Image (spheres, helix red, strand yellow):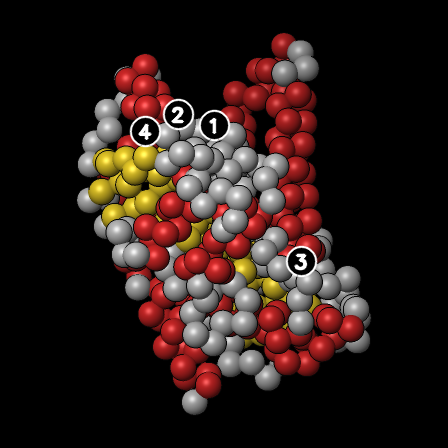
Amino acid sequence: MRIIVDAMGGDNAPLEIIKGAMLSVDEFGIDEIIFTGDENKIKSCAKENGVQLKNARIVNCADEISMCDEPTSVLKEKPDSSMAVGFRLLNEGEGDAFVSAGNTGAITVGATLITRRIKGVKRPAIASIMPSANKPFLMMDCGANAECRPEFLYQFGLLGSIYMKNIMKYENPSVALANNGTEETKGNPLVKEAYALMKEAPYNFIGNIEGRQIPFGDADVVVADGFTGNLILKTYEGVAKVLMGGIKQAFYKNTLSKLSYLGVKSGIEDMKKQFDYKEYGGAVMLGVKKPVIKAHGSADARTFKNAIKQAVWFLQTDLINKIEEELKNERA
Protein backbone atom coordinates (compact mmCIF):
# COMPACT_ATOMS: atom_id res chain seq x y z
CA MET A 1 0.00 0.00 0.00
CA ARG A 2 1.22 3.46 -0.95
CA ILE A 3 -0.41 6.32 0.92
CA ILE A 4 -0.08 9.93 -0.26
CA VAL A 5 -0.06 12.37 2.67
CA ASP A 6 -0.54 16.13 2.51
CA ALA A 7 2.19 17.06 5.00
CA MET A 8 1.23 20.75 5.08
CA GLY A 9 -2.52 20.43 5.69
CA GLY A 10 -4.04 20.93 9.13
CA ASP A 11 -3.56 23.02 12.26
CA ASN A 12 -0.65 20.91 13.53
CA ALA A 13 1.23 20.37 10.27
CA PRO A 14 3.80 19.25 9.54
CA LEU A 15 4.91 17.71 12.86
CA GLU A 16 1.78 15.80 13.91
CA ILE A 17 1.11 14.74 10.31
CA ILE A 18 4.62 13.32 9.96
CA LYS A 19 4.45 11.56 13.34
CA GLY A 20 1.03 10.07 12.59
CA ALA A 21 2.12 8.84 9.17
CA MET A 22 5.20 7.16 10.64
CA LEU A 23 3.10 5.47 13.33
CA SER A 24 0.95 4.00 10.54
CA VAL A 25 3.92 2.47 8.70
CA ASP A 26 4.56 -0.17 11.37
CA GLU A 27 1.02 -0.57 12.64
CA PHE A 28 -0.70 -1.06 9.28
CA GLY A 29 2.15 -2.37 7.15
CA ILE A 30 2.32 0.63 4.81
CA ASP A 31 4.80 0.03 1.98
CA GLU A 32 5.37 3.70 1.25
CA ILE A 33 4.31 7.09 2.58
CA ILE A 34 4.52 9.81 -0.07
CA PHE A 35 4.63 13.22 1.61
CA THR A 36 3.68 16.25 -0.48
CA GLY A 37 4.93 19.58 0.83
CA ASP A 38 7.94 21.76 1.47
CA GLU A 39 10.82 19.25 1.52
CA ASN A 40 13.10 21.43 3.66
CA LYS A 41 10.38 22.03 6.27
CA ILE A 42 9.45 18.34 6.41
CA LYS A 43 13.04 17.14 6.81
CA SER A 44 13.94 19.85 9.33
CA CYS A 45 10.82 19.17 11.39
CA ALA A 46 11.50 15.43 11.44
CA LYS A 47 15.14 15.93 12.42
CA GLU A 48 14.41 18.47 15.17
CA ASN A 49 11.81 16.19 16.74
CA GLY A 50 13.62 12.89 16.35
CA VAL A 51 11.17 11.42 13.85
CA GLN A 52 12.68 8.84 11.52
CA LEU A 53 11.21 9.04 8.02
CA LYS A 54 10.78 5.32 7.42
CA ASN A 55 9.41 4.00 4.09
CA ALA A 56 8.88 7.62 3.10
CA ARG A 57 9.68 9.89 0.20
CA ILE A 58 8.92 13.55 -0.30
CA VAL A 59 7.50 15.28 -3.36
CA ASN A 60 8.52 18.91 -2.99
CA CYS A 61 5.76 21.51 -3.42
CA ALA A 62 6.11 25.25 -3.69
CA ASP A 63 2.82 26.17 -2.00
CA GLU A 64 0.16 25.12 0.49
CA ILE A 65 -3.56 25.72 0.90
CA SER A 66 -4.65 27.43 4.12
CA MET A 67 -7.98 26.99 5.89
CA CYS A 68 -8.94 30.47 4.67
CA ASP A 69 -8.32 29.82 0.97
CA GLU A 70 -11.21 29.41 -1.45
CA PRO A 71 -12.04 25.73 -2.19
CA THR A 72 -11.29 26.23 -5.90
CA SER A 73 -7.73 27.29 -5.08
CA VAL A 74 -6.77 23.61 -5.35
CA LEU A 75 -7.49 23.97 -9.09
CA LYS A 76 -6.74 27.60 -9.90
CA GLU A 77 -4.68 29.82 -7.61
CA LYS A 78 -2.56 27.07 -6.00
CA PRO A 79 -2.06 24.18 -8.45
CA ASP A 80 1.42 23.55 -6.98
CA SER A 81 0.19 23.26 -3.40
CA SER A 82 0.76 20.13 -1.33
CA MET A 83 -2.94 19.24 -1.62
CA ALA A 84 -3.22 19.77 -5.37
CA VAL A 85 -0.04 17.79 -6.03
CA GLY A 86 -1.33 15.01 -3.77
CA PHE A 87 -4.52 14.73 -5.78
CA ARG A 88 -2.59 14.65 -9.05
CA LEU A 89 -0.29 11.90 -7.78
CA LEU A 90 -3.35 9.89 -6.76
CA ASN A 91 -4.93 10.44 -10.15
CA GLU A 92 -1.75 9.35 -11.94
CA GLY A 93 -1.47 6.12 -9.94
CA GLU A 94 1.59 7.16 -7.92
CA GLY A 95 -0.24 6.21 -4.73
CA ASP A 96 -3.27 4.15 -3.72
CA ALA A 97 -4.99 6.63 -1.38
CA PHE A 98 -4.75 10.29 -0.33
CA VAL A 99 -5.04 11.65 3.23
CA SER A 100 -5.18 15.34 4.19
CA ALA A 101 -6.14 17.32 7.28
CA GLY A 102 -6.43 20.48 5.20
CA ASN A 103 -9.21 22.75 3.94
CA THR A 104 -12.44 20.70 3.70
CA GLY A 105 -13.84 22.68 0.77
CA ALA A 106 -10.63 22.30 -1.22
CA ILE A 107 -10.56 18.55 -0.52
CA THR A 108 -14.14 18.26 -1.75
CA VAL A 109 -13.31 20.16 -4.95
CA GLY A 110 -10.15 18.14 -5.52
CA ALA A 111 -11.87 14.81 -4.91
CA THR A 112 -14.76 15.71 -7.22
CA LEU A 113 -12.92 17.44 -10.07
CA ILE A 114 -9.43 15.87 -9.99
CA THR A 115 -10.05 12.35 -8.68
CA ARG A 116 -13.58 12.45 -10.13
CA ARG A 117 -16.78 10.57 -9.38
CA ILE A 118 -17.44 6.87 -9.76
CA LYS A 119 -19.73 6.33 -12.74
CA GLY A 120 -23.34 6.62 -11.58
CA VAL A 121 -22.58 8.69 -8.47
CA LYS A 122 -24.60 11.90 -8.56
CA ARG A 123 -22.68 13.71 -5.80
CA PRO A 124 -19.78 12.47 -3.65
CA ALA A 125 -20.40 13.01 0.05
CA ILE A 126 -18.33 13.38 3.21
CA ALA A 127 -19.08 10.42 5.46
CA SER A 128 -17.97 10.35 9.08
CA ILE A 129 -18.02 7.44 11.53
CA MET A 130 -19.44 8.68 14.83
CA PRO A 131 -19.86 7.09 18.27
CA SER A 132 -23.18 6.38 19.96
CA ALA A 133 -24.46 4.79 23.16
CA ASN A 134 -24.95 1.57 21.19
CA LYS A 135 -22.38 1.23 18.40
CA PRO A 136 -20.68 3.46 15.80
CA PHE A 137 -22.82 4.88 13.00
CA LEU A 138 -22.12 6.70 9.75
CA MET A 139 -23.22 10.32 9.27
CA MET A 140 -23.43 11.65 5.70
CA ASP A 141 -23.27 14.16 4.15
CA CYS A 142 -21.10 16.09 6.61
CA GLY A 143 -20.44 19.14 4.48
CA ALA A 144 -19.70 18.42 0.82
CA ASN A 145 -23.17 19.32 -0.51
CA ALA A 146 -24.92 22.12 1.35
CA GLU A 147 -27.78 22.01 -1.15
CA CYS A 148 -29.15 18.67 -2.27
CA ARG A 149 -31.83 17.11 -4.44
CA PRO A 150 -33.93 14.15 -3.18
CA GLU A 151 -32.06 11.69 -5.40
CA PHE A 152 -28.76 12.73 -3.79
CA LEU A 153 -30.06 11.80 -0.33
CA TYR A 154 -31.40 8.51 -1.71
CA GLN A 155 -27.94 7.67 -3.04
CA PHE A 156 -26.18 8.77 0.14
CA GLY A 157 -28.18 6.04 1.85
CA LEU A 158 -26.94 3.49 -0.68
CA LEU A 159 -23.29 4.55 -0.43
CA GLY A 160 -23.47 4.62 3.36
CA SER A 161 -25.03 1.17 3.48
CA ILE A 162 -22.25 -0.27 1.27
CA TYR A 163 -19.62 1.35 3.49
CA MET A 164 -21.06 -0.04 6.72
CA LYS A 165 -21.45 -3.54 5.27
CA ASN A 166 -17.89 -3.73 4.04
CA ILE A 167 -15.88 -1.55 6.42
CA MET A 168 -17.75 -1.94 9.72
CA LYS A 169 -19.10 -5.44 8.90
CA TYR A 170 -22.73 -4.62 9.73
CA GLU A 171 -24.85 -7.37 8.19
CA ASN A 172 -27.90 -5.34 7.18
CA PRO A 173 -27.21 -1.70 8.14
CA SER A 174 -30.26 0.40 8.89
CA VAL A 175 -30.53 3.74 7.08
CA ALA A 176 -32.50 6.71 8.45
CA LEU A 177 -33.22 10.22 7.22
CA ALA A 178 -32.46 13.09 9.62
CA ASN A 179 -35.67 15.05 10.20
CA ASN A 180 -37.58 17.13 12.75
CA GLY A 181 -40.03 14.29 13.35
CA THR A 182 -40.39 10.57 12.71
CA GLU A 183 -43.67 10.85 10.79
CA GLU A 184 -43.53 10.50 7.02
CA THR A 185 -45.42 13.79 6.64
CA LYS A 186 -42.85 15.82 8.63
CA GLY A 187 -40.03 17.91 7.19
CA ASN A 188 -39.33 20.28 4.33
CA PRO A 189 -40.05 19.40 0.67
CA LEU A 190 -36.52 17.99 0.17
CA VAL A 191 -36.85 15.52 3.04
CA LYS A 192 -40.41 14.51 2.12
CA GLU A 193 -39.44 13.77 -1.47
CA ALA A 194 -36.30 11.93 -0.38
CA TYR A 195 -38.41 9.82 2.01
CA ALA A 196 -40.66 8.75 -0.86
CA LEU A 197 -37.63 7.61 -2.88
CA MET A 198 -35.91 5.87 0.03
CA LYS A 199 -39.04 3.85 0.86
CA GLU A 200 -38.46 1.98 -2.40
CA ALA A 201 -34.69 1.63 -1.91
CA PRO A 202 -32.87 -1.75 -2.01
CA TYR A 203 -31.23 -0.97 1.33
CA ASN A 204 -32.71 -1.20 4.84
CA PHE A 205 -34.47 2.18 5.12
CA ILE A 206 -36.17 2.55 8.53
CA GLY A 207 -37.67 6.02 8.08
CA ASN A 208 -36.99 9.37 9.71
CA ILE A 209 -34.78 9.90 12.75
CA GLU A 210 -34.92 12.87 15.12
CA GLY A 211 -31.80 14.54 16.48
CA ARG A 212 -32.37 13.19 20.00
CA GLN A 213 -32.40 9.60 18.69
CA ILE A 214 -29.07 9.87 16.88
CA PRO A 215 -26.75 9.59 19.95
CA PHE A 216 -28.51 6.37 20.97
CA GLY A 217 -27.44 4.65 17.73
CA ASP A 218 -30.99 4.06 16.50
CA ALA A 219 -29.68 3.95 12.90
CA ASP A 220 -26.46 2.63 11.39
CA VAL A 221 -26.45 5.29 8.65
CA VAL A 222 -27.92 8.77 9.16
CA VAL A 223 -28.54 10.70 5.93
CA ALA A 224 -28.81 14.49 5.63
CA ASP A 225 -27.86 17.30 3.27
CA GLY A 226 -24.36 18.65 3.87
CA PHE A 227 -25.54 21.75 5.74
CA THR A 228 -27.65 19.78 8.23
CA GLY A 229 -25.13 16.96 8.52
CA ASN A 230 -22.28 19.31 9.32
CA LEU A 231 -24.35 21.03 12.03
CA ILE A 232 -25.17 17.65 13.58
CA LEU A 233 -21.52 16.59 13.45
CA LYS A 234 -20.15 19.77 15.04
CA THR A 235 -22.90 19.95 17.68
CA TYR A 236 -22.31 16.29 18.54
CA GLU A 237 -18.57 16.87 19.03
CA GLY A 238 -19.17 20.03 21.07
CA VAL A 239 -21.71 18.44 23.42
CA ALA A 240 -19.38 15.47 23.99
CA LYS A 241 -16.57 17.83 25.03
CA VAL A 242 -18.89 19.81 27.33
CA LEU A 243 -20.16 16.64 29.03
CA MET A 244 -16.69 15.17 29.54
CA GLY A 245 -15.46 18.52 30.87
CA GLY A 246 -18.43 18.74 33.24
CA ILE A 247 -17.82 15.23 34.57
CA LYS A 248 -14.16 16.06 35.19
CA GLN A 249 -15.07 19.27 37.02
CA ALA A 250 -17.61 17.44 39.19
CA PHE A 251 -15.08 14.88 40.35
CA TYR A 252 -12.34 17.45 41.00
CA LYS A 253 -14.61 19.68 43.08
CA ASN A 254 -13.27 18.61 46.50
CA THR A 255 -11.35 15.86 48.26
CA LEU A 256 -14.40 13.62 48.72
CA SER A 257 -15.38 13.84 45.05
CA LYS A 258 -11.77 13.05 44.05
CA LEU A 259 -11.88 9.92 46.18
CA SER A 260 -15.23 8.99 44.66
CA TYR A 261 -13.64 9.22 41.21
CA LEU A 262 -11.35 6.30 42.02
CA GLY A 263 -14.38 4.02 42.25
CA VAL A 264 -15.73 4.93 38.82
CA LYS A 265 -12.48 5.74 37.00
CA SER A 266 -12.51 2.70 34.71
CA GLY A 267 -16.11 3.37 33.67
CA ILE A 268 -15.37 7.02 32.94
CA GLU A 269 -12.31 6.05 30.89
CA ASP A 270 -14.38 3.54 28.89
CA MET A 271 -17.02 6.19 28.16
CA LYS A 272 -14.34 8.71 27.16
CA LYS A 273 -12.85 6.21 24.72
CA GLN A 274 -16.28 5.31 23.36
CA PHE A 275 -17.03 8.93 22.45
CA ASP A 276 -13.50 9.86 21.34
CA TYR A 277 -13.53 11.17 17.73
CA LYS A 278 -9.81 10.40 17.46
CA GLU A 279 -10.62 6.69 17.19
CA TYR A 280 -11.57 7.14 13.51
CA GLY A 281 -9.40 10.12 12.65
CA GLY A 282 -11.67 11.88 10.19
CA ALA A 283 -14.11 11.38 7.34
CA VAL A 284 -14.09 9.67 3.96
CA MET A 285 -15.16 11.01 0.58
CA LEU A 286 -17.67 8.43 -0.60
CA GLY A 287 -18.39 8.26 -4.32
CA VAL A 288 -15.02 9.14 -5.88
CA LYS A 289 -12.81 6.81 -7.90
CA LYS A 290 -10.01 6.43 -5.35
CA PRO A 291 -9.82 6.59 -1.55
CA VAL A 292 -9.71 10.17 -0.27
CA ILE A 293 -9.70 10.70 3.50
CA LYS A 294 -10.31 14.04 5.22
CA ALA A 295 -8.53 13.95 8.59
CA HIS A 296 -9.65 16.28 11.38
CA GLY A 297 -8.14 19.75 10.93
CA SER A 298 -6.85 19.68 14.53
CA ALA A 299 -5.46 16.16 14.15
CA ASP A 300 -2.63 15.08 16.42
CA ALA A 301 -0.39 12.13 15.56
CA ARG A 302 -2.80 9.47 16.85
CA THR A 303 -5.79 11.04 15.08
CA PHE A 304 -3.90 11.25 11.79
CA LYS A 305 -2.68 7.67 12.12
CA ASN A 306 -6.31 6.57 12.47
CA ALA A 307 -7.28 8.61 9.40
CA ILE A 308 -4.69 6.61 7.47
CA LYS A 309 -6.29 3.47 8.95
CA GLN A 310 -9.48 4.38 7.10
CA ALA A 311 -7.52 4.50 3.83
CA VAL A 312 -6.13 1.05 4.65
CA TRP A 313 -9.67 -0.26 5.24
CA PHE A 314 -10.73 1.08 1.84
CA LEU A 315 -7.89 -0.77 0.12
CA GLN A 316 -8.18 -4.01 2.08
CA THR A 317 -11.92 -4.32 1.39
CA ASP A 318 -11.68 -3.16 -2.26
CA LEU A 319 -14.53 -0.78 -1.41
CA ILE A 320 -14.36 1.30 -4.61
CA ASN A 321 -14.99 -1.75 -6.80
CA LYS A 322 -17.81 -2.88 -4.53
CA ILE A 323 -19.50 0.53 -4.91
CA GLU A 324 -19.06 0.34 -8.69
CA GLU A 325 -20.66 -3.12 -8.76
CA GLU A 326 -23.62 -2.05 -6.60
CA LEU A 327 -24.28 0.95 -8.84
CA LYS A 328 -24.12 -1.25 -11.96
CA ASN A 329 -26.64 -3.63 -10.42
CA GLU A 330 -28.94 -0.73 -9.53
CA ARG A 331 -28.82 0.62 -13.09
CA ALA A 332 -29.43 -2.82 -14.64
Q: CA distance from mark 2 to mark 1?
A: 6 Å
For disc 4, the marked residue is 39
Q: Earlier in the sequence, mark 4 or mark 1?
A: 1
Q: Is residue 312 visible?
A: no
Local SS, label 3: loop
Q: Tell me the element at label 1.
A: loop
Judge by depth and name the residue closer to the eye, 31 or 7: 7
Marks 2 & 1, CB-CB < 8 Å contact? yes
Q: Residue at x 44, y 63 (%)?
A: 116
Residue drawn at (54%, 72%) of the image? 122
Q: CA distance from mark 4 to mark 2?
A: 13 Å
Q: Which residue is mark 3?
A: 146
Residue type at mark 4 is Glu
In percent of width and height, residue 107 lies at 50, 49
Judging by the rendered image, the residue that carries numbered circle 2 is: 15
* Quadrant that contains the C terminus: bottom left
Q: Which mark is residue 12?
A: 1
